[in-house]
Image (cartoon, helix red, strand yellow):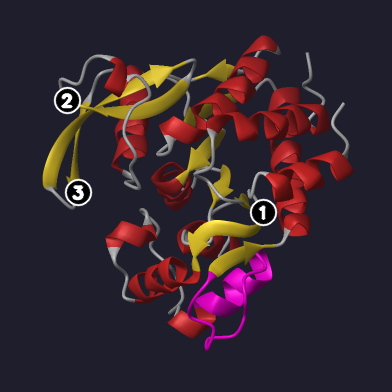
C-alpha cells in the first residue's frame, strides 16, 4: 500500500507537483487564449461565464496552487502537492462509485505517450469488477485541425483506452498514438455508442478534450490537467467536470505508476 506521505514525496521528486516543467509563460498564454475563447484551449468546453485572464489566474491559484500574482510572468509554474492529493482522492471516489454500481465507463487520452499506462491500469481494474469499458467507433476517421492544417486521424483503443493515430500510421513510431487537445475524438466515440444502440458511459475518464468534450455533453467526466489546461478547472468550477486533478501531464510514463496504485487502493480496487 502506498501511503499518502510516500505519494507526496513521489509527486515532488518526479516533478508531478511542486515546481513543474510547465512555465509561467506557457500557462499565461493559455489563459489569454482561453479568455478569447480560442478552441485550442477551450477543449470543447463552452464556458457559461466570461473568464478574463485575471479570473483564470485566480481560479488556477485556487485549484492548482500557482501564483495568484498577475505580475509574475516568468519561471516554472508550481502545483501544490496537497491539491494534487486531494484531487486524486476525489478521482478515486468517483471510480469507486462507478465500480460499486458496475457502471459503464469510457477512457480516452490526448497524452498517450505519457498517460496511457495510468488509464489502462484503471480500465483493467474496473473491467475486472464487472464494469463495461466501452470501445466504440474503433477505426473511425476524425479530422482534427492542427498547427499544420487539418489532419486525419483514426480512433483506436489500447487496453480499453481510446487514443488517435495519424491516418495510415504504422510501425514503432505510431504505437502509442498522437498528442491532441481536440474534443472531436470523444464526440466520435459517443456517436459510435449511439449508432450501436449501446448504453452511454456513466463516467468518462481522461484528459484534454476527452474530459471537456464529454462534460459539455452532460456526461460525468474526471481527469488530469496541467497548469496550462484551464478548461478542465473552469469546467469543474462550472459543474460540468466532476474532478480535475492538477499535476504535470508530460513527465515520464513510469512516474504515473504510483498514482495508479494509490488511486486503485483508495477506490478499493486493488488486486
Residue 101 painted magenta: no
Neighbour class for label 1 at 10 Å: few (<14), some, many (≥20)?
Answer: many
Which residue is located at x 23 percent, y 23 percent? 140
Which numbered disc covers residue 58?
Answer: none
Residue 137 visible in the displayed image: no
Rendered location of residue 28, percent (x, y): 44, 74
Which numbered disc covers residue 17?
Answer: 1
Choose between 269 and 188: the one closer to the eye: 269
Give the labeled residue for mark 3: 146
Choose between 94 and 227: the one closer to the eye: 227
Q: Main secondary structure of the magenta part?
A: loop
Q: Which residues are magenta?
A: 56-75
Q: On the picture, is 235 further left or further right than 80? A: left
Rendered location of residue 244, percent (x, y): 60, 52
Give the labeled residue for mark 2: 167
Q: CA distance from mark 2 to mark 1?
A: 35 Å
Q: Secondary structure at mark 2?
A: loop
Which residue is located at x 88 percent, y 44 percent? 5
Neighbour class for label 2 at 10 Å: few (<14), some, many (≥20)?
Answer: some
Which residue is located at x 79 percent, y 41 percent? 7
Please, is residue 33 above or below residue 118 in the view?
Answer: below
Query: Do labels 2 and 1 touch, CB within 8 Å?
Result: no
Rendered location of residue 30, percent (x, y): 39, 67
Q: On the picture, is 136 further left or further right than 234? A: left
The mark that comes first in sequence, 1 or 3, is 1
Q: Secondary structure at mark 3?
A: strand
Choose between 256 and 222: the one closer to the eye: 256
Q: Secondary structure at mark 1?
A: loop
Q: Nearer the viewer, mark 2 or mark 1?
A: 1
Amino acid at each position: 500500500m502506498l501511503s499518502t506521505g510516500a505519494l507526496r514525496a513521489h509527486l515532488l521528486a518526479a516533478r508531478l507537483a511542486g515546481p513543474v516543467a510547465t512555465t509561467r509563460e506557457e500557462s499565461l498564454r493559455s489563459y489569454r487564449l482561453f479568455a478569447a475563447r480560442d478552441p485550442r484551449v477551450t477543449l470543447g468546453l463552452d464556458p457559461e461565464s466570461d473568464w478574463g485572464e485575471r479570473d483564470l489566474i485566480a481560479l488556477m491559484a485556487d485549484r492548482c496552487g500557482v501564483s495568484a500574482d498577475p505580475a509574475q510572468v516568468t519561471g516554472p509554474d508550481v502545483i501544490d502537492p496537497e491539491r494534487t492529493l486531494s484531487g486524486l482522492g476525489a478521482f478515486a471516489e468517483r471510480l469507486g462509485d462507478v465500480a460499486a454500481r458496475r457502471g459503464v465507463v469510457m477512457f480516452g487520452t490526448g497524452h498517450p505517450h505519457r498517460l496511457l499506462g495510468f488509464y489502462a491500469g484503471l480500465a483493467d481494474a474496473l473491467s475486472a469488477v464487472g464494469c463495461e469499458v466501452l470501445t466504440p467507433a474503433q477505426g473511425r476517421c476524425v479530422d482534427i485541425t492542427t498547427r499544420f492544417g487539418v489532419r486525419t486521424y483514426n480512433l483506436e483503443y489500447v487496453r480499453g483506452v481510446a487514443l488517435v493515430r495519424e491516418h495510415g500510421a504504422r510501425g514503432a513510431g505510431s504505437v502509442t498514438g498522437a498528442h491532441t487537445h481536440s474534443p472531436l475524438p470523444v464526440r466520435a466515440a459517443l456517436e459510435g455508442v449511439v449508432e450501436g444502440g449501446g448504453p452511454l458511459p456513466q463516467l468518462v475518464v481522461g484528459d484534454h478534450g476527452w474530459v471537456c468534450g464529454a462534460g459539455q455533453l452532460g456526461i460525468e467526466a474526471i481527469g488530469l490537467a496541467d497548469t496550462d489546461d484551464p478548461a478542465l478547472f473552469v469546467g469543474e468550477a462550472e459543474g460540468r467536470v466532476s474532478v480535475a486533478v492538477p499535476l504535470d501531464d508530460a513527465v515520464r510514463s513510469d512516474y504515473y505508476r504510483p498514482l495508479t496504485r494509490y488511486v486503485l487502493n483508495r477506490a478499493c480496487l486493488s488486486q
